[in-house]
Image: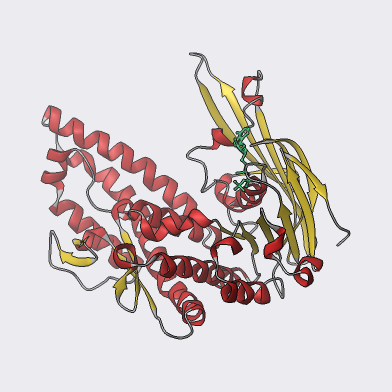
Amino acid sequence: MQIEALSLSNFRIFTRLEMDFPDRLTLLVGNNAQGKTSVLEAVHFLSILTSPLASNDRELINLLTVQDELPVARLIGKVRKQEKTHTIEVRLILNTIQNGSQRLRKEVLIDGVKKRLFDTVGFFNSVLFLPQMTRILEDGPDERRKYLDQLLSQAYPGYVRALSDYQQALARRNALLKLLFDRNGDPAQLDYWDEVITSNGALIIEARLKSTREFEEFFGQQYRRLTGGKEEIRMDYQPSYNGIRVKNGQAELGITAQQPEPIGYEEIKDHFAKRLRALQKEEIRRGVTTIGPHRDEVRFYSNDIDLAVYGSRGQIRTAVMAMKIAETQWLREKTGELPVLLLDETLAELDEQRREDLLGSLGLEEQAILTTTDLGLFSEDFAHTCRIWQVSAGQVTRLNRQ
Ligand SMILES: Nc1ncnc2c1ncn2[C@@H]1O[C@H](COP(=O)(O)OP(=O)(O)OP(=O)(O)O)[C@@H](O)[C@H]1O
């Protein structure tokens, strides 16, 4: 999998950008706040049609353009996949509706043909590493669920659709729970939404359980390698309907005793539905759905120590680096091709040995795009193997002939 060229208009700081990339290594050099990360963000956006850096897509539209009558940001990637070249075009269109408020519409075209968003996520694969991604391990369960969802959306067709249907149904079910409480209504009205929630929820949980187990192997190998064989990593997916709560890094028994983990779709759905029924009265009283994939947790343990609670800065940094390398390998297994690796300011965070390890393993097979404020972090030999672009105030200039 490769990206050959990128064209942006009105995306973030770029009113206009045209770039091309070689098969292997590209280095984006520039001072802070010039647009380097935004190039990586744009490439990754072509994979997952969302940005881990923005709370909503509107933020991605160039601020000056937002004043236009019909603001549009456009991203076009020429990508190579299974020996064929394709064009992915994404348009972010800010429509003003009757009451003056604005609504964002997202359109995707592959090779000039409009496609449904669900069908295009994961058409092109990339792995993005940002220094702030240590948050996946350090912050609350939301970050880890988001991480898993974005990873899985590239590998499992149908995952994004199940997630979107689940989220919509969840909002409707929560509204109905409140209504039933206020009006003392008939709880049988919940049956339809319970079916939608449990059928989509079971798909999501099944995919998450399965992929966590598969991914753990790749992750474990990389983590062992980066810690000189001293540390093991374990991932633990904890469905909320099992009633497990995690406190201070310890799994506690919650609403019910821990059930053996169901494995297949039917079993998960059945188990989830039973728990929902058992909790019905309580949920009507609280007006909220208390179990389901939106409340599930995934924990990471290094030598049985919960990294979110006890992980040192260095351990967490190493774990995230291992996680990203593992993602490329896991995605290769799922899709048959190596994804494009996007590394933002990665080297500044690493000690010299790890820096050399990483650079030594880069670009041998996959295509990688790296950013840096300091070209001095790279050896001359390494820099010679890269195409170097200078990024300055939303403009790019090619610095060498690579
Ligand atoms: N929607 C937008 N419209 C215009 N400018 C934006 C928009 N979103 C972000 N910016 C600007 O883009 C710049 C940040 O770009 P980016 O994060 O890509 O920089 P960078 O070169 O990676 O910097 P650093 O080295 O600090 O990470 C900032 O100046 C920011 O204000």
Q: Residue 346's x, y, as percent?
A: 59, 61
Of 168 and 350, the residue lying toward us: 350
On-image quarter of the C terminus: bottom right
Residue sitting at x 61%, y 71%: 355
Of 336 and 344, the residue lying toward us: 344
Quadrant in which ligand 1 is drawn:
top right
Residue sitting at x 69%, y 70%: 366
Left or right for 63, reference 274: right
Left or right for 321, reference 6: left
Q: Residue 157's x, y, as percent?
A: 53, 59
Residue sitting at x 16%, y 44%: 283
Residue 381 versus residue 374 in the image, above or below: below
Q: Furthest residue to the right?
A: 401
Of 234 and 156, the residue lying toward us: 234
Q: Furthest residue to the top?
A: 99
Residue 5 shows up from this direction? no
Q: Residue 302's x, y, as percent?
A: 36, 75
Residue 271 versus residue 392 in the image, above or below: below
Residue 230 versus residue 27 in the image, above or below: below
Q: Furthest residue to the bottom?
A: 229
On-image quarter of the N terminus: bottom right
**Residue 239, picture quadrant:** bottom left
**Residue 382, picture quadrant:** bottom right
Residue sitting at x 44%, y 68%: 314
Of 246 and 303, the residue lying toward us: 303
